[in-house]
Image: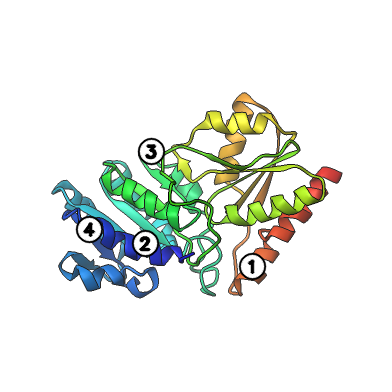
Amino acid sequence: MKALRDVFGETLIEIARTNSDLLVLDGDLATSTKADMFDKIFPERFLQMGIAEQNMVGTAAGLATLGFVPWLSSFAVFFTHRAVDSVRVQMAQTKANVKIGAAYAGILTGLTGKTHQDVQDLAIMRAMPNMTVLAPGDEIECRAMMHWSSTYVGPVYLRLARDAGPALFDEGYRFVPGATYQLRNGRDVLIISTGPQTARCLEAARSLGEAGIATGVLHIPSIKPVDTGSILVAAAAVDLVVTVEEHTIYGGLGGLVSEVLSASLPKRVVRIGVEDCWGESAPNDFLLDKYGLSASRIVERIRGEIAS
């Protein structure tokens, strides 16, 4: 499978061939986000905004009022922290038709370390009224989300991991906002995940199944909106619900699931993710193990919860 940043660059070009209103605004990171692919094909529709994400958001909101469809390209952390006021006031509050391509989200950011790792973005963005929040799990889902987002009128936050991961879907996949996907059934435990982390959860579920613990996996690509009914149905069939996300355990997917279940189906929920700490610069496998996100560490945690 391709890295999501490569898919981002290629899909922008693909959409732009039939949508002359699509523009790309970049925060001097195009070689990293792969928005430079778009620049090479459509240089007249590529705006280099420099290291000034606040200004980029404002410019994009203005362009949207003229009928353009601006896609923004920078690291996630710069949108959700440096430019969060501009996103809040100029995008979310005005319902501006602007799309954020939030690259390098999560902890696996190519050794950039805690300054560039964003594990609070889902919590920040899903709390914003009018904001659609999406986290693709693989290449196919990312491409489908981008096509949908380019026709949807309103602000979108697209969470993009840096690297490639295993495939979750085939070419028959169609993105539906709010939809969830039961990728594996199990009567004992339900793992709920999002983004590329879902692939690691599937690996963990297979290992647990081989050990006699029937484990289901529910993939939630649309953090906001989301079909809460499908979460309730999936959770009703098991005794233990486990959320796993490459994000802080506060306010993201784990918070979402806990809110849904506490309101309608009180159930034990274990949240696996980054536990109230900053990340660090290290290889991906080391970070996944340290923060309990590798398949083996997920298995270890769930077996421990069942035994307790």
User: Which label's residue is closer to the chain start, 4 or 3?
Assistant: 4
Q: CA distance from mark 2 to mark 3?
A: 25 Å
Q: Quick check: 94 left or right of 261? A: left
Q: CA distance from mark 4 to mark 1?
A: 37 Å
The picture places residue 116, in percent across and down from the top left corner, at 48, 68
The picture places residue 288, in percent across and down from the top left corner, at 65, 64
Nearer to us: label 4 or label 1: 4
Q: CA distance from mark 1 to mark 3?
A: 33 Å
Q: Which residue is mark 3?
A: 129
User: Which label's residue is closer to the chain start, 4 or 2?
Assistant: 2
User: Residue 286 lies in what quarter of the image?
Assistant: bottom right
Residue 57 in sight in this render: no
Query: Mark 2–mark 3 contact, CB under 8 Å?
Result: no
Nearer to us: label 2 or label 1: 2
User: Residue 13 lies in what quarter of the image?
Assistant: bottom left
Q: Which residue is mark 4?
A: 16
